[in-house]
Image: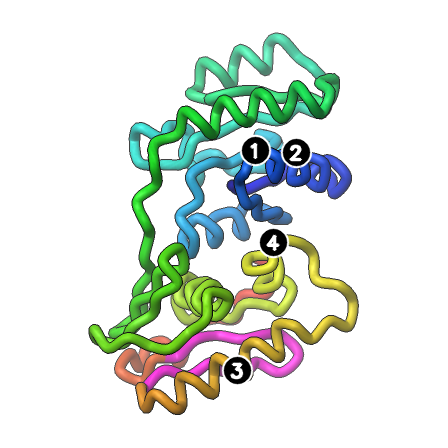
Amino acid sequence: MIVRAGDRTASAMLAAVAETTGTRPTVVNNSGEAELALRSHGRDLVVGDPDVTALSILGNDAQDGGPAFVGWLAARSSARTALMLDGGAAEVLDAAMGEAELAARLRRVVQNLAVPVPAAATFGGLTVNARLHEASWEGMPLPVTPRESELLQVLVAAGGATLSREVIYRQVWRWAMPRGDRTVHVNVKRLRDKLAAAGIPVEIVTQPGVGYRLRVDELSESRDQPVVTGL
């Protein structure tokens, strides 16, 4: 589940409510991060304010292969609720609802979702499926932990573009990175060592002061990918 509301307080509240439904929410700051989360993890439900979420890239209808969409309104509006429901939203929530009602409505949407098909991401000969905690190079399994598979899949989904440490943290650890935190640095180092030990032509490249990107030597064009810091 991806959560994107109009402010941090609303996002935190919705994420906390979502956790009570048995889902694992990912809080994102903008539509670019939501798109990256969809590519890397294949999220099947998006909760967001239509004013700050680009629905054109997220899709409104799970039956068409996109994630289901649940609208969020900071203030109740019958006209906007009707517009979203007519546009394919599975539900519309608003700030006037109590947490128990929000949880019940979200739980109903989650229960009605089809069982998601595990989504894998590929980059050159590298394939990663974080849902199954698997990674492989041209069919050869790589010894990664569940967290490392999530980190690697986010980098794979970026397609060689540079991701800031803050974006990586939000995508993998699901919330804003604390100031001075070195979690991403430590996990990248461990993953980088494993890739080197496996003897495959895959490298996690550090962009000083910015973040990290994935490079696969067989794809020379990936060396010249533009730096993307904000997404």
| Residue 176 appears left or right of 52 | right
* In this rendering, the label closer to the viewer, 3 or 1: 1
Among the two numbered marks 2 and 4 on one chain, the one whose residue lies closer to the N terminus: 2
Question: Against 69, is 203 above or below?
Answer: below
Do the numbered discs 1 and 4 sit on residues whose CB atoms are within 8 Å? Answer: no
Q: Main structural element of the magenta stretch: helix, strand or loop?
A: strand
**Residue 130 placement: quadrant:** bottom left
- Residue drawn at x 34%, y 69% as measured from the top left: 135
Calculate the distance from the C-alpha at mark 3 to the C-alpha at mark 4.
Answer: 20 Å
Callout 4: SS: loop
Among the two numbered marks 2 and 3 on one chain, the one whose residue lies closer to the N terminus: 2
The residue labelled by disc 4 is: 174
Highlighted magenta segment, given as a residue range: 201-215
Give amino acid for label 1.
Thr
Do the numbered discs 2 and 1 sit on residues whose CB atoms are within 8 Å? Answer: yes
Please provide percent x and percent y for residue 59.
41, 34
Q: Single out the residue that lies furthest toward the top.
A: 78
Q: Nearer the viewer, residue 173 or 215?
A: 173
- Residue drawn at x 59%, y 21% as measured from the top left: 104
Please provide percent x and percent y for residue 106.
55, 26
* In this rendering, the label closer to the viewer, 2 or 4: 2
Q: The C terminus is located in which quarter?
A: bottom right
9 inside magenta stretch: no
- Residue drawn at x 64%, y 23% as measured from the top left: 102
Q: Nearer the viewer, residue 136 or 226?
A: 136
The crowding category of the residue bearing disc 3, from other C-alpha atoms within 10 Å (few below 14, some 14 to 19, many at least 20), is few
Tag of residue 21? 1
